[in-house]
Image (spheres, rainbow, N blue to C red):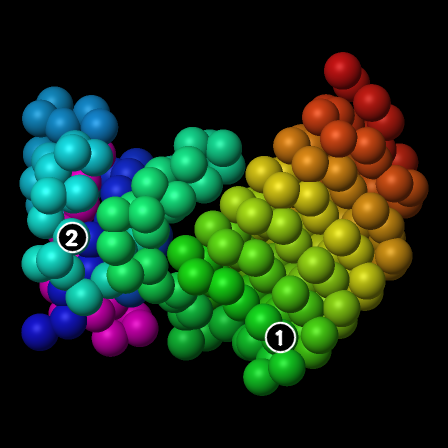
């Protein structure tokens, strides 16, 4: 029986677990630092916290971090990797992923997502429901592309950045590290590190 451990028992974790079952994982168990106040995530048990998952890594065929906060997700991913956790990548069967795209460990690609040829996805990314990442895009560590967001060809997104739901990014645009792009925005020019932008066209909020 293929057993998967997921760190992070939020609503996002629930979708990750469902995706895992669609990918053929037969047993899914959660761990969360809010344990023991959280005992279940819908139909899946929550067995302990980060310490517990580190102690039980050998019991699982794979492990994944399902935490929405990009910085925390990446830090936990590195911790699990350093302790010998077998990090996996989940690609929902209803996603469309080019065989010429590169997708690193610890990434989840949800249903309806499209990833085209030449795209490079680095570890810990979330490619959320119905998003699209076009040819030759490069996504840094722990990037989150939200549901329905669209990246045109050749877009670069820096580490730990978040492109909000329904946003679009013009081709060949560079988005820096730790950037937040607000929902429904249109990014038409480069964005430096550590910015929050929103609007059509997207402008700096802070």
At which x and y percent is residue 111?
A: 46, 65
For the point 14% across and 28% down, the residue is 35
Q: Residues within 10 Å of mark 2 (few under 14, many from 20)?
A: some
Tell me: 202 left or right of 128. right
Q: Quadrant of the C terminus?
A: top right
Q: Residues within 10 Å of mark 1 (few under 14, many from 20)?
A: some
Q: Earlier in the sequence, mark 2 or mark 1?
A: 2
**Relative height, residue 24 to residue 11 (above, below):** below
Q: Residue furthest top?
A: 206
- Residue 101 is labelled as 1
Tell me: 146 left or right of 45. right
Q: Kindly state the secondary structure of the residue where label 2 is placed.
A: helix
Depth order, front residue of 93/1: 1
**Relative height, residue 86 to residue 147 (above, below):** below
At which x and y percent is residue 119?
A: 68, 68
Q: Quadrant of the N terminus?
A: bottom left
Q: Which residue is mark 2?
A: 57
**Relative height, residue 59 to residue 76 (above, below):** below
Asked whether the viewer can see residue 13, the reply is: no
Q: Quadrant of residue 163?
A: top right
Which one is closest to the eye, mark 2 or mark 1? 2
Tell me: 10 left or right of 121. left
Please report the bounds of the magenta region as a residue range.
Answer: 21-32
């Amino acid at each position: 029986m293929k057993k998967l451990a997921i760190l992070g028992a939020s609503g996002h974790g629930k979708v990750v677990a469902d995706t895992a079952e669609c990918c053929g994982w037969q047993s899914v168990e959660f761990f969360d630092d809010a344990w023991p106040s959280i005992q279940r995530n819908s139909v899946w048990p929550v067995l302990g916290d980060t310490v517990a998952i580190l102690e039980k890594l050998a019991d699982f065929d794979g492990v994944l971090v399902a935490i929405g906060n990009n910085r925390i997700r990446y830090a936990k991913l590195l911790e699990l990797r350093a302790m010998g956790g077998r990090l996996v990548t989940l690609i929902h069967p209803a996603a469309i992923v080019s065989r010429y795209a590169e997708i690193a460990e610890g990434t989840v690609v949800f249903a309806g997502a499209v990833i085209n040829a030449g795209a490079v996805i680095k570890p810990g990314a979330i490619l959320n429901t119905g998003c699209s990442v076009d040819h030759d895009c490069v996504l840094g560590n722990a990037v989150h592309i939200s549901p329905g967001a669209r990246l045109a060809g050749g877009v670069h997104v820096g580490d730990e950045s978040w492109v909000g739901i329904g946003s679009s990014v013009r081709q060949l645009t560079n988005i820096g590290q730790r950037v937040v792009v607000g929902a429904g925005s249109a990014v038409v020019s480069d964005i430096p590190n550590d910015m929050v932008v929103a609007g059509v066209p997207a402008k700096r909020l802070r």
